[in-house]
Amino acid sequence: MPTASAGPAPATEPAPVPGHDLVTGHTVYACVMGSRAFGLATGASDTDRRGVYLAPTALFWRFEKPPAQVEGPRPEEFSWELERFCELALRANPTALECLHSPLVEHADATGRELLALRGAFLSREVHGVYVRYAAGRHKQLRADAGRRGAPRWKQVMHLLRMLTCARDLLRTGRLTLDVGAARAELLAVRRGEVAWEAVERRLAVLAEEAEAALPGSPLPAGPDRARVADFLHRTRRASALGA
């Protein structure tokens, strides 16, 4: 005799993404990045969020370590564990360095405020080599992309110009400023494809030359202050282990 149908299986909740609890429960610093932080937002711009979380020290005593970085849980959100973030910033990674200088800070607890107070310790003349190498690689990719598509990806071209300008000004002044200010109209014209690719390439070359010229007299130190950052990380890990 046929048995009665049990009906559809009950819906199950999606499995939690590893690390989301670290972002929601242990973030020490969070900010908005991308076009909104650069002063280049339009009506269609997303809100790009970046953050730093402090994984409890006890999690590192297991075989399975906490994740060094987490995507989500919100759209366009990405976070790093504090130690990973410090490693990147000490290597002059542009994304990490710029996070510490966002004008749009959404959250900073006591640890986050100390991290912000340390942001000068990450800056050094090493930004020149890192930024210029990154820009050269992106320029090559954009040129190849323009050859394949007949035109480059103008939004990426705009951000490359912004980044090189930022690097030049950082080397000149010792200050990292994200908002493009008066250059907004010019950069948005590039994004709309209103500036010839040849003119953009000339501008990229000039910016690279100006960054090179600013290097010898830059007020930045030769290298980052690794000792200050290491002391901060050690104290923060120790306080977490002691439950402070």
Image: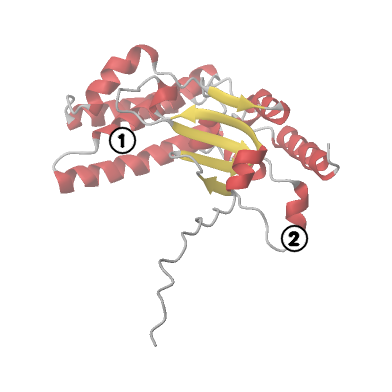
> Residue placed at 67% from the left, 39% from the top?
26
Residue 62's disc is: 2
Q: How is the image coloured?
A: secondary structure
Crowding near the residue tagged with mark 1, few <14, some 14–19, many ≥20 C-alpha atoms within 10 Å: some
Place of residue 147 in the rendered image (x, y in percent of width and height, measured from the top left): 17, 46
**First-in-chain label (2 vs 1):** 2
Place of residue 175 in the rendered image (x, y in percent of width and height, measured from the top left): 54, 19
Up-down relation of residue 107 to residue 55 (above or below):
above
Give the farthest residue toward the front. 1
> Residue placed at 47% from the left, 62% from the top?
10
For marks 2 and 1, give the CA distance. Answer: 41 Å
> Residue placed at 68% from the left, 25% from the top?
113
In the picture, residue 225 is in which quadrant?
top right
Q: If the image is split into quadrants, where does the N terminus sit?
A: bottom left
Up-down relation of residue 175 to residue 2 (above or below):
above
- Mark 2 lies on a secondary structure that is loop
- Mark 1 lies on a secondary structure that is helix
Place of residue 139 in the rendered image (x, y in percent of width and height, measured from the top left): 31, 39
Answer yes or no: is residue 105 visible: yes
In the picture, residue 115 is in which quadrant?
top right
Nearer the observer, 114 or 163: 114
Up-down relation of residue 233 to residue 113 (above or below):
below
Give the farthest residue toward the top. 182
Q: What residue type is labelled 2?
A: Arg
Q: Does residue 127 appear left or right of residue 211 in this picture?
A: right
Q: Does residue 201 appear left or right of residue 104 in this picture?
A: left
Answer yes or no: is residue 124 visible: no
Query: What residue did someone put label 1 on?
Result: 156
Nearer the observer, 190 or 42: 42
Closer to us: mark 2 or mark 1? 2
